[in-house]
Image: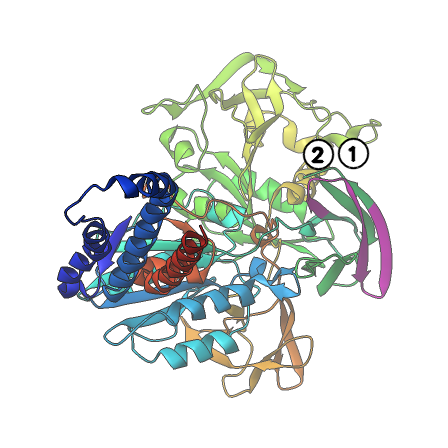
Amino acid sequence: MNMLWQHFALWPWLALIAAPLLIHLFALTRPPAYRFSSLEFIRRIVRRTRRIERPQDWLIWLLRTLAIAAAVLMFLRPLLFVRGGGDVHTARHVVLVVDASASMSSVENAQSRFSSACSEAAEILGGLGAGDTANVVWMKAKPEAVFPSSGINFSYLRDSLRRARVTSEAADVASALKLGVDLLSGLPGRKEICILSDFQKTNWEGVDFKLPPEYKLFTVRVGASDGDNRALARLTAQPVEPLAGETLTLYAEVRNFSPSPRKATVYLNFDERHEQQEVSLEAWGQAAAVFTLRAGQAGSFPVTVRLSEDAFAGDNVRQLLLRVRDRLPIKILASEPETAGYWRRALETLPWAQVTMLASNQWPAEEADDILLLSGWDGAGAETVAKRLQAGRMTIWQPAPETPQERLAALGIAGPGLATNGVLSWETAREPYRLTVASPDDPCFALFGHGEYGDPAGGSFLGRLRLPRLDQPSSDLLLAYRDQVPALIRFRFPGVLYLWNLPLQSAAGDWAARPEFLPLLAELLLSGRTFASSGAGSGTLYPGQMASLPAEQAPLNTAFTLEDEQGGKLLVEARESNAKVYLAAGPVKETGLYRWKAGDETLGWSVVNFPIVESDLRGGAASSPTTGSPAMSSGREVRQAQTGLNLWPGLVALAGLFLLMESVAVWGASKT
């Protein structure tokens, strides 16, 4: 707490405080006393009376002293700084970081949190004076500043605060704070950053408020309540990319962001089909509404689910772009020709498989969404496969003998048996190796439940790779040899990798000739789509992101548009890179379904969904205990912390009060 005296040059006037004491002492001086016996009786009576009046004299003196002290201090113009500060003669440079993310649209007392934040920001601007500068940073997915640098046009900033609208975007807190620091960098004087936000729990948890030492940080929390909200958190399809005519399951995940149990109704809209399902939600819990559908013809189709209305409507709708395929594109890299040939001949008998053979040095493009089968690959260039797995693609890999074990680690495969300098050695035996089913309840074995398609553990092998133990949380051992050497393992990344140790060469066993080979291979490909995320959310975005669409077949001179559900159009730019055309638009601001068009022709769709991180309306910490940044309750409090609290109006009132009390005391003394 600091005190600043604006007119400290008037400090000699403080001597006036002694005036009432001097007057009081002067009144107590006595003339020479002469005693007369005839007057002694009267003197005794007066002495007794003065004993009663004397306390009133001291009270009058005290009130007069306090009144004059308040009047003198009033002219010194004191400023009180409760939270430090006091350097009012130095120019201030203030950046107001206003949260414009989706949670700020929550309404309390007929006013949104965002409107409250803008009002408090305008209050802070009102405390700036000549020589000060200010700027406003909108905190959203990509933070933006009103001015390229701090300026003095405060009226324009206030107008920007009045005209601003809250977005449906998630807040990038770190980028907003960095932008605020950069805007003040290099400026002389006091540098202050004020954050006005609801400090929504999910967004702000773990945020480091620490700024360079020359910066002062203020925080103002808006939104008194924690909100009561239910939200559609996810919408997924299994399989992710169904085949035409295939049955699929839609899962709509609903979350309850409130301390009380709730019920909600989920409504489905897909290709003229309308269904609804009620879910019960525990406090802070979640549940899923499950819908079973049949995919129609091949193409991309939007799926929409809605939630029964609540006070926060932004997250009550979620959409998914469902891609229905007529066939699965499969590419086989033929490093080991015999195995690749067996794979090709088996898959070509399946009506839903579109098979392409690749030479050993011919890799598909990274963005290709096909399934890749690697026969006899030694792991060289594992980075390419790792990128495909992280992009949600499916791969089946039969390693070549002497493959370095470190190349398995390059794909993200781990296990206690992996050796840094080890290799996958080939071994043979006099007695054939036999298989066991390690995970009989796995979906890939469901087809074999009644024995109609044989025994997936049948067959005998005269040779195999000596694979080490590769058990990890994201893996499933499907088949193993009876001595526990892995034969078939599934690794779950965003994509799926099957490690295939079932030799198909005729010299290594009879597996390729057995009836179980084709159905097991087909089930691996079909069930693997349940674990892989390829195509999940294809074209799915969040507010604040750029929308893009590959359009290789679209002519460059065509007029492209991106339309929202209300028919509004966004500016689209056609870009060419590596002889490929990409359409780009945005950033898109609102949720919904967007249609890419070339003239009147529909090229594709993009889905913009609500960021679930904004659905938990509870407030988090509005200050950092490590930095000691003060948490304020209003813009007025920030303004007082910046400019100080003017005490002279209170001193005027005190002086008047003391004079009034002195008058009452004098009147009472005269009556006595």
Q: Is residue 260 magenta?
A: yes
The dot on residue 444 is: 2
In the image, taking residue 100 as reference, residue 94 lies left or right, namely: left
User: In this rendering, is residue 590 above or below 419?
Assistant: below
Instruction: Specify the principal SS of the magenta part.
Output: strand
Residue 357 screen position, x and y as percent: 54, 52
- Identity of the amino acid at label 2? Cys
User: In this rendering, is residue 54 above or below 441?
Assistant: below
Q: Secondary structure at mark 1?
A: helix
Q: Secondary structure at mark 2?
A: helix
In the image, taking residue 338 as reference, residue 193 lies left or right, namely: left
Front residue of 666 and 535 = 666
The dot on residue 447 is: 1
Is residue 86 in view? no
Tell me the quarter of the picture where residue 179 sits: bottom left
Residue 299 screen position, x and y as percent: 71, 65
In the image, taking residue 415 as reference, residue 181 lies left or right, namely: left
Are the residues at dot 1 and dot 2 in contact (C-beta closer than 8 Å)? yes
Residue lying furthest front in this view?
A: 38
The structure residue drawn at horizontal position 36% and vertical position 78%, both measured from the top left corner, is 154
Front residue of 468 and 331 = 468
In the image, taking residue 416 as reference, residue 283 lies left or right, namely: right
The structure residue drawn at horizontal position 66% and vertical position 77%, both measured from the top left corner, is 602
Q: How many marks?
A: 2
- Identity of the amino acid at label 1? Leu
The dot on residue 268 is: none
Label 2 Cα neighbours within 10 Å, binned few <14 / some 14-19 / many ≥20 = many
User: In this rendering, is residue 141 above or below 435?
Assistant: below
Q: Is residue 3 magenta?
A: no
Residue 421 screen position, x and y as percent: 31, 24
- Residue interval drawn in magenta: 253-278
Is residue 277 in view? yes
